[in-house]
């Protein structure tokens, strides 16, 4: 008999979670103004809000914490992280920051001015926020196929190089500080970008003299998908693939809270010494001295170990298999999802699950609230609330996709939790006809409103 798959680790520590009644959840979500971010962690049974900073560190990382050198300047831990970044990404300069958006803040302060255009593949919300905050434009050049949820293609997160070239032709070079390629494409459903697409994007950028920035939160998962889906890479190691990906990049920003599997941290790295010097002053202003940025020495230690461990095939394989396990259960139950399953999350296609709900009543948010009421499971809306208002017209933006993201934290939940999630989704799906009204906004801020928005029933 062939042995089934098992995870390449065992569990050393557990953390209790608590179930609740539907009546309790109804009260809690009302008190949270129907914003899932405002729920207390203890009011949630299975927390799929994000996999960012919520993964479970390895014993190697926990012991690395003890080695942390907390020197203000020149800490040993900084040099250990610097060595890992140079070796893994081939980037000679880096600045530590407290997380991904801080890296964006630092580098964009050095690069972006009002009126600039930043083409890319579905910019992440914080990235778009930092661009629009500077009165610049995040120009979406994602392939059209990304919006077709039931289309199964291997690299659904790619940039459309033709759209990119059109942007390069339309706007003068001085107005385009860089092109941003996000790997994997989070906003389009955790979908990967092929090496071919990275290479062609880099060639196009070079042709027009525009730097290429890789937004790298899920770089290791992207490399896993290249290995398992792109011809010519099946026999390469994840580290070899990562190394090649970054030979095409001039700059990288990263939230280390995802594929780095640490609770906090990030950095920006680059090839240009001139840009490094320019960005350094903003790092000192916003984050901290050059050799710690927003991170403690111990956090840099744990990240150095995390970057190494999580660019190994087995760790990625375990993670992505679990996401696929959930995706396959949902498919079996006939629940519409973004196909194929992404690397870190499942994205329920809320428009197809609740076709009778008008978009003005926030379809994916409504689905998220229903799933919480059903079983205490917390996902997150990736739809029109997240899309914010148009900065010019102040009208709500309604993206092509209304998704409810169920992000699976690394090494935190077991397959039994996945079974509970799938069953809860099925129960909501089975009563979808009864879900006929959504929510209206009672309070919001102009940028990244989803974190603090308040809603009420229609
Ligand atoms: C998470 C993420 C960010 C922002 O990182 P934070 O650590 O949350 O600030 C930026 N880009 C992408 C693609 C991300 O996934």
Image (cartoon, rainbow, N blue to C red):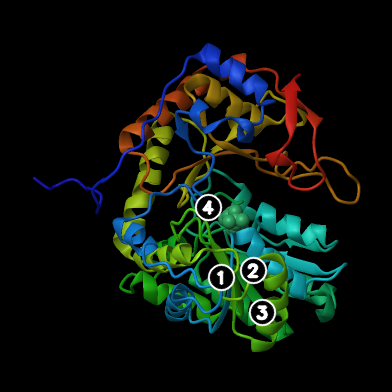
User: What residue lies at 60% left-to-right and 21% top-to-bottom?
Assistant: 28
In which quadrant is the C terminus drawn? top right
**Precedes in sequence: disc 4 or disc 1:** 4
Report x, y in % for residue 238: 37, 69
**Precedes in sequence: disc 2 or disc 3:** 3
Picture disc at residue 204: 3
Answer yes or no: is residue 428 visible. Answer: yes
Residue 451 position by quadrant = top right
User: What residue lies at 42% left-to-right and 61% top-to-bottom?
Assistant: 225
For label 1, the residue is: 292
User: Disc 2, disc 1: CB below 8 Å?
Assistant: yes
Front position in the image: 125 or 171: 125
Above or below residue 456? Residue 289 is below
**Precedes in sequence: disc 4 or disc 2:** 4
Q: Quadrant of ligand 1?
A: bottom right
How far separated are the C-alphas under marks 4 and 2?
31 Å
């Amino acid at each position: 008999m062939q042995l089934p798959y098992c995870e390449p680790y065992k569990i050393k520590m557990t953390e209790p979670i608590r179930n609740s009644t539907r009546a309790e959840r109804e009260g809690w979500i009302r008190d949270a103004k129907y914003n899932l971010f405002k729920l207390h962690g203890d009011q949630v049974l299975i927390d799929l809000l994000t996999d960012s900073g919520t993964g479970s560190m390895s014993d190697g990382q926990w012991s690395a914490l003890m080695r942390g050198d907390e020197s203000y300047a020149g800490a040993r831990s900084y040099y250990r992280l610097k060595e890992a970044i140079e070796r893994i990404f081939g980037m000679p300069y880096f600045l530590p920051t407290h997380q991904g958006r801080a890296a964006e803040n630092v580098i964009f302060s050095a690069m972006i001015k009002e009126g600039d255009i930043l083409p890319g593949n579905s910019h992440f919300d914080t990235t778009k926020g930092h661009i629009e905050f500077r009165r610049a434009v995040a120009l979406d050049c994602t392939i059209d196929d990304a919006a077709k949820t039931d289309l199964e293609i291997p690299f659904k997160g790619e940039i459309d190089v033709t759209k990119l070239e059109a942007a390069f032709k339309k706007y003068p070079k001085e107005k385009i500080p860089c092109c941003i390629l996000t790997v994997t494409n989070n906003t389009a459903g955790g979908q990967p970008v092929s090496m071919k697409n990275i290479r062609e994007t880099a060639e196009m950028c070079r042709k027009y003299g525009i730097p290429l920035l890789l937004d790298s939160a899920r770089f290791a998962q992207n490399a896993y998908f290249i290995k398992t889906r792109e011809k010519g890479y099946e026999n390469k190691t994840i580290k070899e693939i990562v190394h090649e990906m970054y030979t095409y990049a001039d700059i990288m920003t990263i939230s280390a809270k995802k594929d780095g599997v640490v609770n906090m941290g990030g950095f920006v790295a680059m090839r240009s010494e001139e840009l490094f010097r320019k960005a350094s002053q903003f790092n000192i202003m916003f984050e901290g001295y050059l050799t710690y940025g927003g991170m403690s020495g111990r956090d840099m230690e744990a990240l150095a170990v995390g970057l190494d461990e999580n660019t190994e095939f087995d760790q990625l394989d375990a993670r992505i298999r679990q996401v696929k396990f959930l995706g396959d259960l949902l498919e079996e139950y006939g629940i519409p999802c973004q196909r194929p399953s992404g690397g870190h999350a499942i994205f329920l296609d809320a428009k197809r699950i609740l076709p009778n709900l008008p978009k003005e009543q926030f379809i994916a948010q409504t689905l998220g609230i229903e799933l919480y009421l059903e079983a205490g499971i917390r996902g997150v809306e990736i739809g029109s609330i997240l899309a914010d208002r148009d900065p010019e017209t102040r009208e709500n933006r309604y993206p092509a996709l209304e998704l409810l993201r169920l992000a699976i934290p690394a090494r935190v939940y077991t397959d039994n939790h996945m079974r509970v999630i799938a069953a809860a989704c099925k129960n909501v799906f089975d009563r979808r006809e009864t879900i006929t009204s959504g929510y209206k906004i009672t309070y919001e801020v102009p940028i990244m409103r989803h974190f603090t928005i308040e809603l009420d029933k229609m």
